Structure formats: structure tokens, C-alpha cells
Image: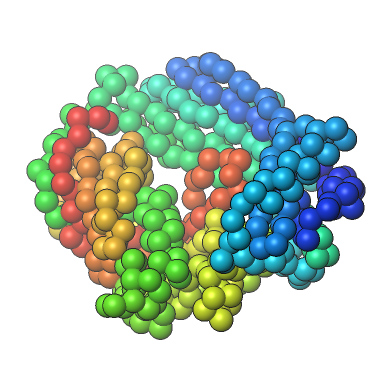
Amino acid sequence: MFLTSDDAKALSDKILARSNADACVVKIDGGEDHSLRFARGGATTNLATSEISLRISSHIGGRVGSVTTTRLDDEALEAARARSEEIARMLPVDPEYVAPLGPQSYETAARYDDNAASLRLDALTAQAAQVIAEGARVGVDTFGCASSARRFEALATSAGLFAYEPRSEIDLSATARNKADTWSGWAGAHEFFGARLDAASIARRACAKAAQEAEPVDLEPGDYTVVLEPVAVADIAFWLMSAMDARAADEGRSFYSRPGGGALIGEKLFDEKLTIRIDPTDPLAPEGGVGWEGVPHRARAFIDRGVVSTLYRSRAWAQKTDAEAVPFARNFIVEGGDAALDDMIRSVKRGVLVTRIWYENMVERKSLLLTGLTRDGNFLIENGRITAPVRNMRFNQRLGELFGRIEALGTTQRTWRAAGGGGAAAAPPMLAEKFHFSSKSSGV
């Protein structure tokens, strides 16, 4: 269910007016989603959903009780409000309690498309058809998923805050496999505006990577020069960003901690080519204006030319440390350089071109040791030329080392994310040395 700003405010005002708590917070989110899966020339499943969720958090004497409901009738809302107050009274006092925020000023992020037609199932069908047609032309089998979403988030407090953000999303993920079923290629994109998604380009890239007649080769585990395509860089950078929690750093539990505790803010931990930032007004990958707990997102760099410039900080930790609250970012931009992807490949004597990765997990948070698998399109580079497809491999890589020895960066591009979560990232292709592949994988 998609609510307008007026509808969300009327609903939250009704709940706040009935509250008997010291303070009250109402969070509402919901929307409509469409998806279409396709395989080997036709659609396999399609799905349309509509959902809404409302959470009431009652603050009583430094304690917070919360109840979530998916029903919006008066009886259900009143029961949820009363139950949240009952829960709050039963809880112990929270030593890190923070009262709800009052009115805030937010940047307006360009993340909502008024053209609902560009998000409907027939639009997704047209995109899937382009992938299927390109596969037939090239002679490969195609598979994939096209998804769209129209969603909103609203936040209201008894202290006078009301925030509302709508967003639209559309994504296309296309995988192609050669007829011998020995090799696959992939391409995908995610946009907030339907007209910006270029299905034809996605289809061409996925099918061209899959149309390989040569038998894929196995590489021995070891350290390799790699050219990581933008989606692979974004996936790895996400783990770098997700570890940037100020509390963990201050308490000595983080890669960003000084020996004995304290955050390494202002320290150069990465190659000077690395800058990662967020910006609600950025046209390529805008962050939402409203952050966690209602704290506004502002344009800021988390890593500036290799130097850690800020970390995420919850309101509770900000209050305890007398510092600025900085909300967690769902979107980020890795700044690029001026190197062309073809030039990166030409500079490699022996290495691997990696399309994307998946199944990543953090093995050791303190050292940012990440493991994962490559997927859908590795290629062997020899003497500056792509010479053969390479079967997938597992990697174990410390991210500080990877981002500490960047050889070159290309142009930053918007990268694929599954629609629905509101996340988007932009990253460049990256050339790096000594990327550690730890074992072989039989998959293609």
C-alpha cells in the first residue's frame, strides 16, 4: 500500500494524539512491488505485492516499548498503542536512552518517478523481451529478473518531527549461458527512474560475455592482478563501509580502531585514490534525505583520498561521546579516475577480469578479511589481452590491503542492486594487485 504524505501524516497524528506515553514515535513504511522472472525464451513467474507496516514506539521513563502492525483500522492501532505502552512499563530503564527528535531540515533526494507506467509489469515485460531477443540473436540462453517498486517511509514524533520520503526503483538482472552450458555472462542495472534503465545495453553485455566457445580454464589459487568491474567494486566497498561504526572503533573492536581503543579518524588507511562519499543531491546515486532515527543525511566523505574522515554514529553513542550523530548510509559513491577499462586490461601481463562477486561474508571484522566467490564472467588476461574464460574462484581478501594498493580507477558508474531496499551504489572499474584467490570453484 502506497500512502501519500498527507495520508501518512493524518495516520501518525491520530496515533500521537492518543498516546499516554512521555513521548511517542510512529514509523510507517510500505509500497507496491512488481517482479518478472524469465528463462530460456519466456516468462516463468510474475508477482505483484502491496504491503504496509506501522510501528509505534512508546517512551516512558527512559524505557521504550515498540509494537508493529500491518492493520490500519482504529481497533488494531489502538491495541498496538496500548500494548507498546504496556511493554515500555515492564522494561528496565535504558542507560543509553535518547528522547525522540524534534523538527529537522532534510535535503530533497531525486528518488521518485511520478511516471507509474514505467514501473508496471508491462514495462518489465518489455525489458525482459529485449534480453530474450538478444540471446536468440547471439545464440545463448538467457535468464533473469526484472523488478520495480514504488515505496515510501514516514516518521513522526510527539516532539514535532514529521518526515516523508517516497522512492521508485527499477532493476534488471540478466544472466546468459552458452548452448554448451559451459560458460555464463551477466549484466544488470538499478535506477530510481524507469526511463533511465537501458535494457538493450544490459542484454548486449550479458550475451556477449556468455558467447564463448573456448573451454574455460582453471587457475591455481594464489595472488593475481585483477581488473574488477564496477559492480564487483561496489559489492566489496559495501563491506568496507558497513564496518565504519564509531562505537566499535572507539571500543577497540574495529579495523578503524587505534591500538587500545579510539577511532582512527583523520588517519590515512587506504590508497590516496580512494574516496567514498554520500550525497542526497547527487544525480548518480542519491542517498535519501532522512537517515536512521530521523537524523538528516548530509553530503559527506567517509574516506577522503585514503583518509578516514568520519564514521557512522548512533544518536545514543553521539550523546555519550559528545559528538555529531551520523546515520548509516544505504547509498554511496566510490569516486573514479580517468583510466579506461581497455587500458587497464592492456596494462596487465597476467591477471583476471572479474565481472561480479556473490556470497560474500566477513571472516574477521578486525582485519576486514572478506571471503566470497566470483560469478558469471571471469576472463584470463595475458599480455594485455583477454585470452580465455576462467572458472569461478573463491577469494579471501583483506580489504585494507586491497584498497591500499589501487593501481587505477575508471569512470564511476551506477551499479546494480535488487529493487525494494532503497539502496544504490556507484563505483568505477578498478585495477589492483595481489588479489588473493584461495581455492577453485567448479561453477561457471
103 is higher (above) or lower (below) than 235: below
Q: Position of residue 401 (x, y in %)?
A: 24, 66
266 is higher (above) or lower (below) than 344: below
Q: In the image, 390: left or right of 210?
A: left
Front-lying residue, 111 or 79: 79
Image point 69% across, 42% down: which residue? 67
Quarter placement of the C terminus:
top left
How many marks do you count on the picture? 0
Q: In the image, 441: left or right of 362?
A: left
Q: Quadrant of residue 63?
A: bottom right
Can residue 120 be seen at all in this image of the molecule?
no
Image point 88% across, 49% down: which residue? 18
Q: Quadrant of residue 278?
A: bottom right
Front-lying residue, 312 or 99: 99
Q: Position of residue 208 (x, y in %)?
A: 38, 35
Q: In the image, 9: left or right of 117?
A: right
Q: Position of residue 272 (x, y in %)?
A: 35, 77
Image point 33% across, 36% down: which residue? 376
Q: Quadrant of residue 206?
A: top left
Can residue 418 be seen at all in this image of the molecule?
yes
